Image (tube, grey):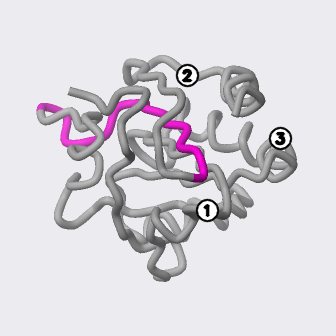
Amino acid sequence: MAIQVGDKAPDFELKDNHGRSVKLSEFRGEKNVVLLFYPFAFTGVCTGELCELRDNLPSFSDRDTQLLAVSNDSIHTLRVFAEQEGLEYPLLSDFWPHGNVSRAYGVFDEDKGCAVRGTFIIDKEGVVRWTVINGLPDARDLNDYVKALDTL
């Protein structure tokens, strides 16, 4: 079952596309976090979503918000993907142990071996304030994130 609004966001530490460790709790008291899970790098819908976020980064930075995108790809795959698409925000690898963080948030599809499209907006205190989970083929609407951030 997916994490719900009002739940404390499970802390985690994952490597980003540059091999640096990123810990969710590092942002506590500092920034809100948009935690976005996506199935795979280099796929059509995922690339479209992540490039739309890239093109609208001020919508997040202007709202004191850190964007973190998580997939079950390796850091090496994520590095090439970020370079190819010009993605400047952290792409986090939930590759090994495979899907542990995705499972903790209730968005891991055991049959497909990847995360579904789950997004969690986490406030500066570490509490989930908004969430949406879409099926694998269904892109999310960036405007929904911005509206939710404006309520914090």
Label located before the other in sequence (2 or 1): 1
Q: CA distance from mark 1 to mark 3?
A: 20 Å
> Magenta stretch?
111-124
Report x, y in % for residue 71. 40, 51
Q: CA distance from mark 2 to mark 3?
A: 18 Å
**Crowd rating for badge 1 (residues with CA inside 10 Å; few <14, some 14–19, many 20+):** few
Q: Secondary structure at mark 2?
A: loop
Q: Secondary structure at mark 1?
A: loop
In this view of the protein, which residue sits in the foreground, 25 or 82?
25
Label located before the other in sequence (2 or 3): 3
Q: Reply yes or no: does residue 112 show up in magenta.
A: yes
Q: Residue at image x 75%, y 48%?
A: 54
Q: Which residue is mark 3?
A: 59
Q: Quadrant of the C terminus?
A: top right
Report x, y in % for residue 106. 25, 35
Q: CA distance from mark 2 to mark 1?
A: 30 Å
Q: Which residue is mark 2?
A: 139
